[in-house]
Image (cartoon, grey):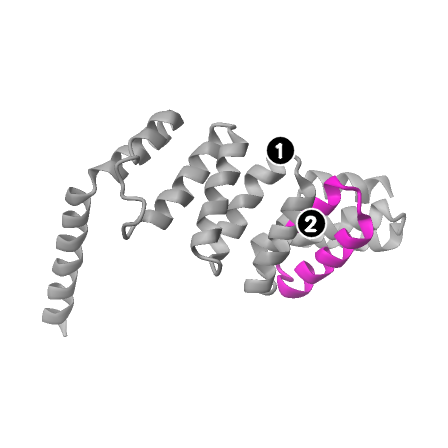
Amino acid sequence: MKLFSTLALTFVITAAGTAQAENPVWQSSYQFEAAGKYTEAINVIDPIPANGADAEFKLMRRGWLYYLSGRYDESIREYRYAIERNKKSIDARLGILLPQMAAKRWREAEQNANAALDLSPNNYTALLRLAVIFEAQKNWDEMAQVANTLVSSYPTDSSAYVYLARAKAWQNKTGEAYAAYSAVLVRYPGHLEAQAYVEKK
C-alpha cells in the first residue's frame, strides 16, 4: 500500500512537472495576472489553438482577464463563445454574470443566472448573484424569493440571511427583517449592517 502511494505520488509530481514544462504559456499568463498586467496575460495565451484541448479554457480565461481589466464587452463576448462551445458549462454561465453585472446589464445577467440554475438547481453562486441582480433592479419581491431559497438551501450562510433581511426591510416587513438580521448575527457576530439594524430597532 505504501509502495502504491509512493508510486502514485511520483506519477502525479512527474505529470504535473511535465505539464508545467509543456505549458509555460499558462504559467506566464498567471504571473502577468498576479502583477496586474491583464493585457499581457491575455496576449501570452494567443498561441493556444482555438480548436485544441484547451480551447474552452482559453475562452474562459480571456473572459476573466477582460473582466478584470474593465473591458466588459470583450469579456461578455468571450464567455458567450464559451457558452456556444459548451452549452452545459455552468462555469461559463456564472462567469458571464460578472461583466454583465459590472456593466449593469441586469436583464441579460438575470437570464444567464436562471440558465445556470436550470443546469444546477440551487447553485449557491447563481442564487447569490441573482439576489444582487434583483436588488439592483429594486425588485424586492423576486429578491425575497431568491433569498428564501438561499436560506433554505444554505441555512448556515450569513450572506443568505443578509439578502433576505434587506429584501424584507425594503418590503417594510420590519419584523421579518429584524429576525433575518438577528439570524445574521448568530452566524456572523459583529456584522456591521445587521448590528446597525438590530440596534436601531
Relative to 65, say whether 79 is above or below.
below
97 or 135: which is nearer to us?
97
Relative to 140, say whether 33 is above or below.
above
Q: Amino acid at mark 2?
A: Ala
Q: Can you give x and y, in whole percent of width and height, for residue 117 in the image? A: 60, 60
Does residue 75 appear in the picture of this structure?
A: yes
Calculate the distance from the C-alpha at mark 1 to the C-alpha at mark 2. 17 Å
Does residue 189 appear in the picture of this structure?
A: no
Whether residue 64 sits left or right of residue 136 in the image: it is left
Whether residue 56 sits left or right of residue 176 in the image: it is left
Q: Amino acid at mark 1?
A: Ala
Question: Was residue 151 drawn as part of the magenta stretch in this picture?
Answer: yes
Residue at the (27%, 39%) spot, across then down: 26
Residue at the (72%, 49%) spot, across then down: 163
**Residue tagged by mark 2?**
131
Report helix, strand or loop for mark 1. Answer: loop
- Specify the quadrant of the image occupied by residue 5: bottom left
81 or 13: which is nearer to us?
81
Residue at the (33%, 48%) spot, across then down: 55
Residue at the (26%, 33%) spot, across then down: 28
Q: Can you give x and y, in whole percent of width and height, for residue 126 in the image? A: 59, 54
Q: Can you give x and y, in whole percent of width and height, for residue 80 in the image? A: 50, 46
Question: Was residue 199 drawn as part of the magenta stretch in this picture?
Answer: no
- In the image, the segment drawn in magenta is 130-159
**Residue tagged by mark 1?**
103
For mark 1, does the 10 Å Cα neighbourhood hold few (<14), some (14 to 19), or many (20 or more) residues?
Answer: some
Q: Which mark is residue 188?
A: none
Relative to 30, say whether 13 is above or below.
below
